[in-house]
Amino acid sequence: MHPLRRIRAYWVWVIFVFVALVLISFNVGKRRSWTPVEQVVIEITAPLQKFIRKSAQTVERAWLKYFSFVDLREENSRLKEEKDDLRMQNDLYRELVSTHARLRELLQFKESIRSPMVAAQVIGRDPTGWFESILIDKGAQAGLRLNMPVVDARGVIGRLVAVSPNYSKVLLIIDQNSAVDCLVQRSREKGILKGLPSQFCRLHYVSRAADVAVGDKIVTSGMDRIFPKGLPVGEVLEIADTPWEFFKDVRVKPSADFSKLEEVLVLLKEDPLSSPSQKTK
Amino acid sequence: MLHGVAWFLSLIYILLKGSVVNEVAPLFFDIDLVIVITASLLMSSGSAGAAVFAFGQGMLIDLLSAGFLGLFALLYVISFLCLELGARFFDLRSVQGQFILVGLVVLFKEVILVGLLDAFAFEVVLSAALFFWFGASAFFTGLIAPLIFSILSHVQTRTAGETKEAA
């Protein structure tokens, strides 16, 4: 290789490493929304992601339908056509019923909470597999702002950590960077709920003297000023009380099923963590 | 044209990972197309384009993910350097060279990622299963590398042919 090209290659590398390190240094431990340039990237890529997700769902349905048809090959064509027709209608009906049930649950939940909310569809998940976040198809134009709580019919999902005009990123409560101030519903013991590497959470800072039992319901305390008080979060799954530890190790199974998120509700409440100057903007 | 195809292919794969792949694939199993395409660009169009590609794709992943901004950009730039250095010892024009170098870089990237996450107080359970999946990711990414190399090389040959004809 020509020496000049080699020098250029190293310079390119040094510059990019420097930029990446600067970005990490300025962003580690902080949560900030997307910058205008990043918003443009999201606005371009998110519709593509929405399309990919819809296509994948269609392919999945067709694939499942194909398998359900394999056993019917021996049937005569008339019966088969009738059966296929009925099956398709049935699939459609089931899909409608399941969508209806999900939306009814969401509606009931919406009615039980007085604050205004916006329904959004999940269009993508975290591409790394290491972090737990989702992308939803509503953004600033629908009234969404940073740190708004996101819930579904079963309970708390997470909070908005980045917002563009039409899309938002939600940090799920099962992510290790997430923290939710919670209460044990029965005994009113407090703790901070954080995500674990699995799809579970841990309730931190629960003293050894605290009254917590397996099966206890965990709800939001409202003390973090992000989540309204009393939203269901999960259920105590396991408690380890080690003699030399200050706190109990309380594992919590979240109420929401994070592997099947399709629609979520965003509670439209003002960002409690923004400064007064930001609020007036 | 080659860069356009490379960027588009990688973008689609990243979006697919966020939509489908991560839902069906085992946790921590990661066929890393970004590293394969970076290696292919490094071989066919030099360092600068490959470095910009690695950094850009890393930034895109950072934007879509809940991790720290710059984390994956840094990881892919480090991977790019590993490819650049590794290309002196392994021939990226041979199938064996592509398989070995890409696999090694994927493995190295996963180890660096765990190290960085640990440094940022992120709890990672180091288990045999985790390293098994890292090995599997490296192996399968290495396996897929010659195919991607050949697709991108075909695109480059066609583009070069069309340019010549136009001239």
Image (cartoon, grey):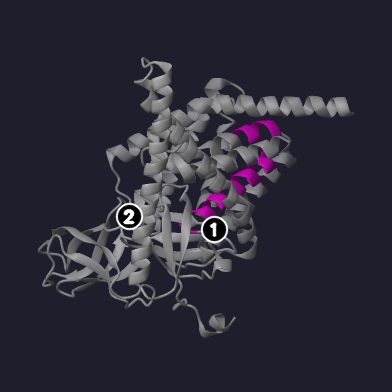
- Same chain? Circles 2 and 1: no
Residue beneath disc 2: B123
Name the chain under label 1. Answer: A
In space, the residues marked 2 and 1 are separated at their CA atoms by 21 Å
Tell me: residue A114, above or below residue A105.
below
Q: Quadrant of the N terminus of chain A?
A: top right
Extent of the magenta region: B39-68
Residue A156 is at least partly visible in this image: yes
The secondary structure type at the circle numbered 1 is helix
Residue at 42% over, 41% down: A92
* Magenta span includes A226: no
| Prevailing secondary structure class for the magenta stretch in the rendered image | helix
- Mark 1 nearby-residue class (10 Å; few <14, some 14–19, many ≥20): some
Horizontal and vertical percent position of residue B32: 50, 37
Between A265 and A210, the one nearer to me in the picture: A265
The secondary structure type at the circle numbered 2 is loop
Horizontal and vertical percent position of residue A146: 49, 70
Residue at 65% over, 46% down: B52
Three-letter amino acid code at the position of disc 1: Leu
Q: Quadrant of residue A214?
A: bottom left
Mark 2 near mark 1, Cβ–Cβ under 8 Å?
no
Q: Relative to residue B123, is residue A38 drawn left or right?
A: right
Tell me: residue A27, above or below residue A226.
above
Residue beneath disc 1: A21
Horizontal and vertical percent position of residue A264: 42, 59
Horizontal and vertical percent position of residue A268: 46, 73
